[in-house]
Amino acid sequence: MELNFDYCGFKKSELFTKDYQKKIKEIHLKLHQADHSAGTTWVDWPVNYNKGELILTQKLANQIKENSDALLVVGIGGSYLGAKAGIDMLAKRSKVEIVFAGTNLDFSDLNGKLESLRDKDVTVNVISKSGTTIEILATLNIIERFMKNKYKMAYKSRMIFTTDKNKGYLRERANAEGIQTLTVPDNMGGRYSVLSAVGLLPFAVAGISVKKILEGAGKAFEDLFEESIELNPAYQYAVYRHYAYKRMYKKIEIYSSFSTKFNSFGFWLQQLFCESEGKEGKGLFVTPLAYTTDLHSVGQFIQQGTPILTETFFEVKKPLRDSTISNVPLGSPIKFLDGKTINDVCEAAFDGTVKAHADARVPIVILSIDEINEFNFGYLVYFFELACATSAYLLEVNPFDQPGVEQYKTYMKENLKNS
Ligand code: PA5
């Protein structure tokens, strides 16, 4: 993975000031302390993950591959977006279809999904750290009816709850009814949990190598263990975001990609940054954009609208697949593309977009990877978790709580109890 600051609109050395280095040193110590109670279990997870749990996860994945056509994953927010990001980026042709539910309160959406599973063998993985989230428990209620109709009381052997080790409704039910469980580790919030069973079970079922994902994250842990900003790209990126926000008055950060494989990853990033940083009246609002689709809609705003944007481009050096444009007839407006590949065209679009947005003085960082694969996914997940927690600490907010989300959950429950 490489970060290119050539188009960021200021000298990279401005990221290496004594003041920033002092703050980063404090943050580095805070993140790497042995006591994880602040919410930092994810920090050394790539090297200290629970090996027994990983073996169990793989065993369950193999069982599901043998006895199911579909894995119905029920989760929301951090209990959904990371798994969805990995599946959409990495999933190969797999015997078992992964279907996500519980991500909204639109019954017609759920009903459509259940209809499509009517004649299939299904395993259900309910993911909720708290075990109290209304969307999840309401969806589970409907899904249990569906499963009971299908498998009678044997349906419970087709349920897996991924939840807190000791507490919460799902844990209590699992203990009482003998339902199989996996664990969301202590002091690991939903948005930082993708490298735990939360993401790893759906990945393993989809035929994605969880070993390679963890290897990639482990390499990132090693590479990014440096407290020097100059030697640590995650700290450089966090400082860059702080500089863009504080000194350049940017309010929105765009994650742009020309590969649709990054679409869901962008939504995981949106949650990671918005929920970690967006408090006490601070933080960059993060939004993913899919190019070239969005260049034909919001591209105009990026170049000539209110100058509040900063942009990070994802660049993948080696495309997954490519094809050559050939036999273009004389007189066609794309005759000059004859013999070029779709990726040649995409590269021209990429370079042209970076140039146009840089001309419009949008500060730009380009994050490049050689190719899309499990190792790089694990590397990127860890890179962004570290950059995000560091960014939040630079803003002097707690990266690991979400008081706003909790307030919405409380109000919703009060409304329902009083109605
Ligand atoms: O990242 C977070 O902490 C949140 O987005 C939660 O993951 C989300 O609210 C779902 O919570 P739970 O896993 O407890 O059902």
Image: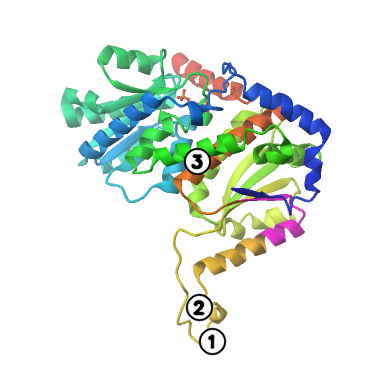
Look at label 1 and name its amino acid: Gly
Identify the image quadrant of residue 122. Answer: top left
The residue that disc 2 covers is 339
- Asked whether mark 3 and ligand 1 are closer than 8 Å, the reply comes as no
The residue that disc 1 covers is 331
Cα–Cα span, label 1 and label 3? 49 Å
Look at label 2 and name its amino acid: Gly
**Number of numbered callouts drawn:** 3
Cα–Cα span, label 3 and label 2? 36 Å
The tag earlier along the polypeptide, 3 or 2, is: 3
Secondary structure category for the residue under label 3: helix
Measuring from the top left, give residue 175's x and y in whole percent: 31, 13
Q: Is residue 56 magenta?
A: no
Q: Is residue 365 magenta?
A: yes
Instruction: Please give the range of residues in magenta.
Output: 354-367
Measuring from the top left, give residue 202's x and y in whole percent: 37, 36
The tag earlier along the polypeptide, 1 or 3, is: 3
